[in-house]
Image: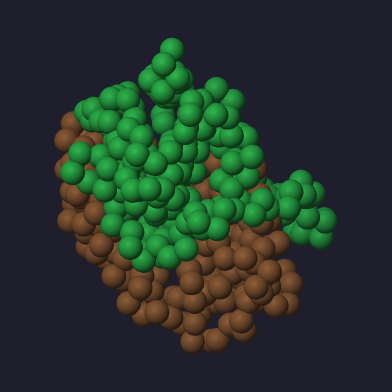
Amino acid sequence: MSGTVEPAGLIVAVATRGDRSAFAALFAHFAPRVKSYMLRLGAAPEAAEELAQETLLTVWRKAALFDPARAGASTWIFAIARNLRIDAVRRERRPAIEDDPSDGRAEVEPDALVAAAERGERLREAIAALPPDQAEVVRLSFFQDKPHSEVARDLGLPLGTVKSRLRLALARLRGQVEDLR
Amino acid sequence: MSVMSIRHHPSEALLTDYAFGAMGPAQAMVIAAHVHACEHCRRQVEAAEAVGGALLDELPAAAMAENALDEALALLDRPAPAVAPRPAPTPQPADWIRVPPEVAAAAKRKRWLAPGVWVAPVDTGTKGGPLSYLLRVGARLRMPVHTHRGCELTLVLKGAFRDGREVYAAGDVAEADDSVEHSPAIMGREECVCLVACDNRLVVKEWLGRVVQTYAGI
């Protein structure tokens, strides 16, 4: 993030104070990236723009549900974008598996924001350090929206090979996500 | 009901597809229901979502319309879009693993196909698309031998079945693809209730037809 404030802190500022300049900073960073993601997955430019808008508006509305101890800012925003896209493209609603939001949220400790930022940083480093064959299948499934069976077909690899690469990659990356909890 | 004993989890590849949104609604329903009850797989999905977040973060910025931010700011105070009121959740049978409300509600639509066997479609909002459904098979019954064209996912909600050398009990997920020909048998004295997703609606119709033939003696 280009600004000086971590995105997790910005979401918390939106949640606790309805802070519009924090929203603007989140918008400046994430809306163009969400749009970019939608474009890569084949959305038309207007649809991609609209989904990016809707994603950030959802961030504003649901900011109080953001819990930096559970997910980083980009993870949380990615999940919102993904769900909006699924709604739009497939007209399908996913069953909710989140905890009941009416449970309310504990006060956010400043430490949780620092920890979230560190986790994000370590995860990025771990992704960059993945062996190329593992990184390839992870990126293909993410950026092409293809189930692993299609990724295997595209790469001319046996299904079992793709499955084991994803397993190894996820095991390695999961360590970075959970270490600091 | 305790699901500490889950032995068959969905593959990491399926959990990643689910987290990345690269999965059809029928299979997503089964994975969501498993993750709902399985802390281990919930963590896997969260890890894959974190990877998704990191990859989103490193994407190049696409140019937004010039007034995009102003438009967004103008919309901040608009009331939240009306969300269709959710029907009061159907209480789920106490002897099933914990399932999402959509799955519990599906049981109301059950149709008996044959003595001991009922099915109930789970509405995923896609007409004519892939299908997820609840399947109840009475104790000691065996399914007719069948194969799957496309991938089939089965989550056991109650009871257990044996397929070849493997036993699948409550909370377990069985993945079958078209290389598998099988004839699962229900174990023990208890009925078995599963949530099943199949890529191919036609295959489901044919196969349920076989069930009717086999047990109703048509």
B110 over B96 or under it: above or below: above
Residue B51 at least partly seen:
no
Q: Position of residue A33 (x, y in %)?
A: 50, 52
Residue A62 visible in the shown view = yes
Q: Residue at x 68, y 53 (%)?
A: B89
In the picture, residue B125 is in which quadrant? top right
Is A39 in front, or is B20?
B20
State the residue in front, B197 or B144: B144
Could you say which chain is coloured green in the image? B
Compared to B99, does B180 lie above or below?
Answer: above
How far across and how far down the image is residue A132, in percent? 18, 51
Which chain is drawn using brown? A
A24 left or right, relative to B155: right
Residue A3 in picture, x, y percent from top left: 53, 72
* Drawn side of residue B216 relative to residue B87, left or right: left
Q: Residue at x 32, y 45 (%)?
A: B187
Q: Is residue A37 above or below residue A43?
A: below
Q: At x 50% / y 80%, what residue is drawn?
A: A113
Residue B203, located in which quarter of the rendered image? Answer: top left
Toward the viewer: B217 or B112?
B217
Most foreground residue, B102 or A146: B102
Total numbered badges shown on the rendered structure:
0
Q: How is the image coloured?
A: by chain
Task: Please identify the residue farthest to the top as the structure is shown.
Answer: B218
- Which percent across, then down, holds residue B55? 39, 55
Tell me: A164 left or right of B199.
left
Q: Relative to residue B182, is residue B121 drawn left or right?
A: right
Q: Residue at x 43, y 12 (%)?
A: B218
